[in-house]
Image: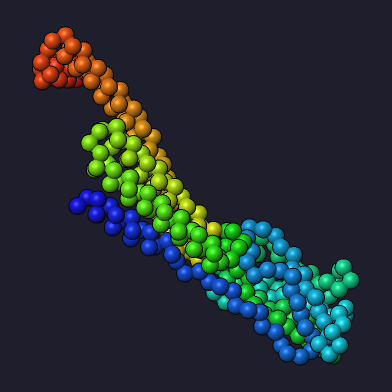
Amino acid sequence: MLKKINLIIFSIIFLFVIIPFVSSAPPQENPDGLKIRSGIKDYLKIGNDYDVHIHVFNINDGLPVTDASCYLHLYHSNGTHIITLEDDTIDYDFDYTFRLDQNNITEKGSHPYIIQCNTSTLGGFISGELIFNNYGEELKEGSAITFNFSMVFLMVLWVLAVIGIFAFDNPVGKWACYFIAHVLFIVGTFSVWQFNEGYAIAYTGLASMFKVFFYVSTFALFPIVILAISWMVYYHTLNDTIKSLIERGMDEKEAQERARREHKWL
């Protein structure tokens, strides 16, 4: 019964690993006037500075525009305005550049932006989303599948180790299975914590929950190791004493009782 309860609990925890992640919407732009191309990727790592380079072209002839005034408007995920940046001077022949300071974005999330450029006769804009997380990478299907299969593999090993605790009669085997299960639990909670902490763009509570699981299970391992070593010393010392008493002609039952009395406080 206990084995089934442990398996159910671990399975429920594992199911919480799969959480919704937001994909960036494709950039939108106006169909005439100026065509704007941005050199910045959609997913960015929070806490870094970024230069947003854009190229501006005349849609009618495809030539670069070097006399435009360009603006970048960045918004918080809740819709409030964060910052407006302006550049009317080209670099590297026809680059317009905006500097995003790390202090502009202090929270993970999906932040809409609009880049607008105007000349005296033409105008154009492009809009999209800059998504900030702790990895600066999009959670792609291949990464998600690899992670989920890894978690399934860890769960299978963990279940086998838990079954071994009840299946082995030898105390050493029970301790070995317990340690394996404990270490696998530490590895699993660390992996889930890092996965959610890195890819999530909103607070879900999962990262914090598994972070607590990781630290608690890690620190709990040390007293258990000390207890296991002490128990193994006691167990082997007791067996050696029993064996010695039996070899001297004492009855096995009497030898066990006497050995336990002698090593009562060991």
Residue occupying the point 71% across, 88% down: 30
Which of the 4 quarters of the picture holds residue 235? top left
Which of the 4 quarters of the picture holds residue 167? top left
Residue 43 versus residue 125 in the image, above or below: above
Residue occupying the point 79% across, 85% down: 34
Q: Is residue 146 left or right of residue 34?
A: left
Residue occupying the point 34% across, 27% down: 229
Which of the 4 quarters of the picture holds residue 111? bottom right
Q: How is the image coloured?
A: rainbow
**Rendered location of residue 40, percent (x, y):** 71, 69
Residue at the farthest top position: 248
Residue occupying the point 50% across, 54% down: 194
**Rendered location of residue 218, percent (x, y):** 41, 42
Q: Is residue 244 left or right of residue 37?
A: left
Q: Is residue 38 visible?
A: yes
**Rendered location of residue 90, percent (x, y):** 86, 72
Taking depth in this image into account, of 190 and 66 the one nearest to the observer is 190
Number of marks present in the image shown: 0
Residue 140 versus residue 13 in the image, above or below: below
Q: Is residue 261 visible?
A: no
Q: Is residue 233 left or right of residue 52?
A: left
Q: Say which quadrant the C terminus sits in.
A: top left
**Rendered location of residue 99, percent (x, y):** 74, 65
